Structures are given as structure tokens and as C-alpha cells.
Image: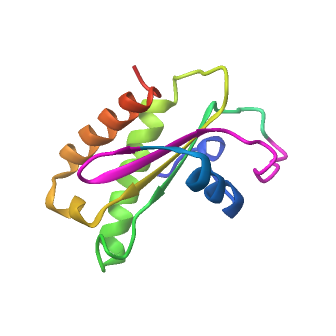
């Protein structure tokens, strides 16, 4: 399962903005970068009726796993988890979130990774 279209973060300018301006939250297996949205940088969408107040992206490097099948399974796992956790949350300002997995994440189970993700989202103030 992928993130719904209105929750996806797109465009290299958005990622550059998050890397430069975003706040970082660290755990042993991942890094969460969060910033308030800069809507001037985002690619314009024609059908933006169902606007989400949070847009997400996930980065899983080749260092995590050389096998694309494994990386895709992790990506689908996180997309499903994020769409479930963040779909009902409503914010005043739009927020951009970017999750980068570290190579050490392969030592942990999927449930441990999702718990770490929840802790980082709580630490960043995205979930309660």
C-alpha cells in the first residue's frame, strides 16, 4: 500500500528545503526531519480538494539492504503505518516530514521499527 496522493511529498526542492530548514529527531534506526510547509516549493496539483495537513516521504538507502525487494517491503510497511496513523490528524499549518532509515535498522524487527517511528512522531509533536 502506498501513501494517499494528498499525503505524498514530491519535488527535489521540497527535499532540499527539509534538509536545510527541518528539525531533526534521531533514534537508533532512523532520522525524522520535520518542518513547516513552504507551499511555493511544492508541485501544483490540479485536484487538491482532499488536502492533508501533513505530507510524508521515506528514504531507504542501498546501504540498508542491497535487495530492492527488502527495501520495497520496508517502504510499503512504513507507508501503510503512516497513512493509518496520520490520516485523522488535522493541523492548522501544513507539515512536511521525511524519514530516513539507517543501515542499522535491519537488525530490528518490523514491530520495533514501527514503535521507533511512533516515538519519533511523538517527539516531533506530530502525534499525541
Q: Quadrant of the C terminus?
A: top left
The image shows residue 49, relative to residue 57, as above or below, that is above
Q: Main secondary structure of the magenta part?
A: loop
- At a point 21% along the width and 63% down the height, the residue shown is 104
From this view, report whether residue 22 is shown above or below residue 75: above
Q: Nearer the viewer, residue 16 or 4?
A: 16
**Residue 68 position within the rendered picture, expressed as x and y whole percent measured from the top left:** 36, 76
* Badge count: 0
Find residue 16 and report its horizontal and vertical position in percent. Answer: 64, 59
Q: Position of residue 90 (x, y in %)?
A: 59, 21
Q: What is the basis of the colouring in this image?
A: rainbow
The residue most toward the bottom is 66
Q: Could you tell me which residue is drawn at 26 percent across and 41 percent down?
A: 116
Name the residue rendered at 48%, 31% in the picture.
86
Is 29 in the magenta? Answer: yes
Picture quadrant where residue 124 is located: top left
Quadrant assignment, res 93: top right
The residue at 78%/38% (across/down) is: 48
Q: Per the image, is 30 magenta?
A: yes
Residue 41, compared with residue 88, is above or below; it is: below
Horizontal and vertical percent position of residue 40: 82, 46
The residue stretch that appears in magenta: 25-47
- Taking the image as shown, residue 87 lies to the left or right of residue 74, namely right
Amino acid at each position: 500500500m502506498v501513501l494517499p496522493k494528498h499525503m505524498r511529498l514530491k519535488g527535489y526542492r521540497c527535499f532540499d528545503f527539509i534538509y536545510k530548514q527541518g528539525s531533526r529527531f534521531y533514534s537508533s534506526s532512523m532520522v525524522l526531519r520535520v518542518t513547516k510547509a513552504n507551499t511555493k516549493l511544492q508541485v501544483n496539483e490540479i485536484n487538491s480538494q482532499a488536502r492533508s495537513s501533513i505530507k510524508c516521504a521515506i528514504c531507504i538507502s542501498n546501504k540498508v539492504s542491497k535487495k530492492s525487494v527488502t527495501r520495497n517491503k520496508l517502504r510499503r510497511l512504513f507507508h501503510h503505518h503512516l497513512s493509518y496513523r496520520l490520516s485523522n490528524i488535522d493541523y492548522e499549518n501544513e507539515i512536511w516530514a521525511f524519514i530516513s532509515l539507517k543501515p542499522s535498522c535491519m537488525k530490528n524487527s518490523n514491530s520495533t521499527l514501527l514503535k521507533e517511528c511512533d516515538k519519533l512522531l511523538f517527539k516531533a509533536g506530530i502525534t499525541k
